[in-house]
Amino acid sequence: MKAVLLGTGTSVGVPVIGCNCAVCRSTDPHNKRRRASLYLQAAGLHIVVDTPPDFREQALQFRIPRVDAVLFTHSHADHIFGFDDIRRFNTMQDAIIPAYADSETTADLRRIFNYIKLEKTPGVYRPRIDFREVSGTFNIGGLIIDPFRVKHDHKPTMGFRFESDGRTLAYIPDCLEMPDEVVDRLKGVDVMILDALRHTPHKTHLTVENSVKLLQRIAAKKSFITHMCHDLDHEATRKTLPDGINVSYDGLTMEW
Ligand SMILES: [Zn+2]
Ligand SMILES: [Zn+2]
Ligand SMILES: [Zn+2]
């Protein structure tokens, strides 16, 4: 399994437009955060989770060669507004690409991107997507994907647990509260990547402190916080986290 964090920032990204705080002016590349997205290679497949507004630049910078499936956690703008750029992969692969999401997110995607179809439209360059609604565990080839609901906003939001050849990874970029049964299902995964917006409480995101508490209960072999805002300087935050819990950054790559 190979995972690349394409983006680790909150909805406005870091630096924030018009902000002169120390993190937004920082020259540490770890403090440049695009909107949250994950690129996973497993079971011979290339998967992306969410297509943020930065998706085109992420695909270019991190050289994504193909996309066999797109998964969506939810339909907030920072997770979907790069979806149109999937059309380039339709062209390269000369294939329809499946997009997996729950029924509410699928309905939003169909409404917002209402020009997306399965078939080619002569003379017009559009993505060709096969929308697939998910409710329980599903497989893409040899990759087993376990979706589960977490509390985030009023919108239903999913996280995913991936398993292939005994390797596991779970990704939950947007979360306010995690039910106990979800914590139980995630216990002992190889890699756990979880929302941690900032230190101050927020009405839709975990604080660093609450995220760390959940990560300690889940006890993955490696844990990372993501979806961070400009309150969090990479290096300063890194020094305060307990052993085994790390601050992610754009381009962080793991292979195991
Ligand atoms: Zn988000
Ligand atoms: Zn700032
Ligand atoms: Zn969100």
Image: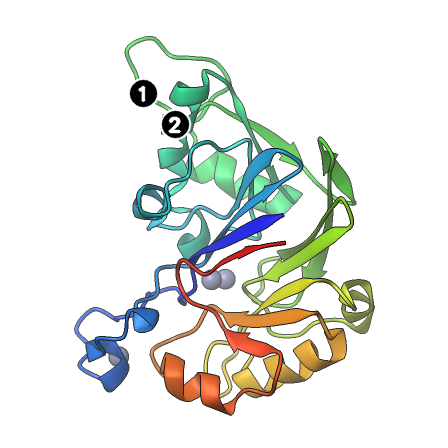
In the picture of the structure, the residue carrying the numbered disc 1 is 125
Location of residue 103 by image quarter: top right
Name, please, the residue furthest toward the front. Answer: 256
Ligand 1: does it lie within 8 Å of the C-beta at label 2? no
Residue under the point 81% across and 63% down: 185
The residue closer to the viewer here, 83 or 22, is 22
Residue 199 shows in the view: no
Q: Is residue 54 left or right of residue 83?
A: left
Question: Would you say the residues marked 2 and 1 are in contact, meaning their CB atoms lie under 8 Å apart?
Answer: yes
Residue under the point 32% across and 73% down: 31
Where is residue 193? Give x, y as percent.
Answer: 59, 65
In the picture of the structure, the residue carrying the numbered disc 2 is 87
Position of 30 relative to 66 (above/below): below
Upstream in the sequence, badge 2 or badge 1?
A: 2
Q: Is residue 95 left or right of residue 1?
A: left
Where is residue 1? Give x, y as percent.
Answer: 63, 47
Q: Amino acid at mark 1?
A: Tyr
- Can you tell which mark lies on residue 144? none
Where is residue 173? Give x, y as percent.
Answer: 54, 63
Is the residue marked by circle 1 packed among few (<14), some (14-19), or many (20+) residues within 10 Å? few
